Amino acid sequence: MRIILLGAPGSGKGTLAKKISRDFDIPQISTGDLFRAIVKENSPLAEKVKSIMASGGLVPDEITVELVKERISRPDCKKGFILDGFPRTIAQAEALEKISQIDSVILVELANEIIIDRLSSRRTCPNCGEIYSVQDNPENVCKKCSTPLIQRDDDKPETIKHRLEVYENSTSPLINFYSDRLFKVSSAGSPDQTYMPVKTFLEKLEAKGE
Ligand code: ADP
Ligand code: ZN
């Protein structure tokens, strides 16, 4: 089962991807996480990616496509995968068509005002990548690995606004691109409420043998 999660930054793609990955036993491929790992290296590419991410812009398509191409060619992707944060431009989607066939695209919908609230209160574990909100975790320490949480540079108000514009301009045209295999879900409720219809949908898709 090869799936794409489409949605604005902060719409809840990552949370949903983790649940799908667990239940359907396919890897979550988050380009954001892959880039955050690259940034920790000491290389010219790391410097470049770091400044792009901090500004809320997009890493160039060539770099991003190569990264995903390599990742989905690995053995753990044989049974399928969930792309979380890729493609983000029409050019990336066109490149993906040449390397893999996507069964379904899940569009995670959420109003911008809620997105801004959620992203501003989001805190991330710099060690294991777990995500929390200030409200649920006032201690500000990771419950899995005890590392103090941080606010991602790109979760600061100025950058959030820019990321939403980039989504509107560059990524939202993909909704049309994938109109033949789109499944829409609202993430206004809890993570489990969001997941329920998606789970039912994917079980049917799986039963069809995709
Ligand atoms: P969010 O979905 O919360 O914005 P991500 O973790 O998916 O965050 O991505 C963080 C940043 O990584 C993006 O703002 C962008 O700079 C870069 N990035 C991630 N995926 C892509 C992609 N497919 N193409 C270009 N840049 C990307
Ligand atoms: Zn942690």
Image: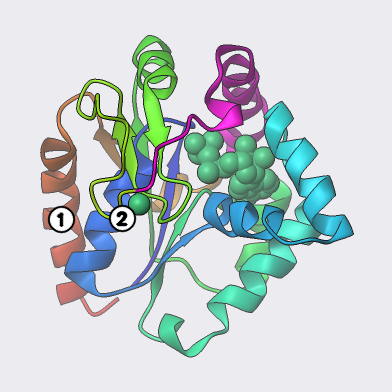
Give the numbered dot on residue 145. Answer: 2
Residue 38: quarter of image: bottom right
Image coords of residue 57 (percent x, y): 72, 32
Please tell me whether residue 142 is drawn above or below residue 169 in the rendered image: below
Q: Which residue is mark 1?
A: 199
Q: Write the residue at 40% across / 56% down.
A: 128
Q: Write the residue at 11% across / 37% down.
A: 193
The answer to whether residue 127 is visible is yes
Ligand 1 shows up in the quarter that is top right
In the picture provided, is 200 more to the left or to the right than 7? left
Badge 1 element? helix
- Three-letter amino acid code at disc 2? Cys
In the picture provided, is 196 more to the left or to the right than 113? left
Crowding at mark 1 (Cα within 10 Å: few <14, some 14-19, many 20+): some
Compare residues 195 and 159 and report the one nearer the observer.
159
Question: Residue 164: within the magenta?
Answer: yes
Cβ atoms under marks 1 and 2 closer than 8 Å: no
Q: Main secondary structure of the magenta part?
A: helix
Image coords of residue 14 (percent x, y): 37, 47
Crowding at mark 2 (Cα within 10 Å: few <14, some 14-19, many 20+): few
The answer to whether residue 60 is visible is no
Q: Write the residue at 25% across / 54% down.
A: 144
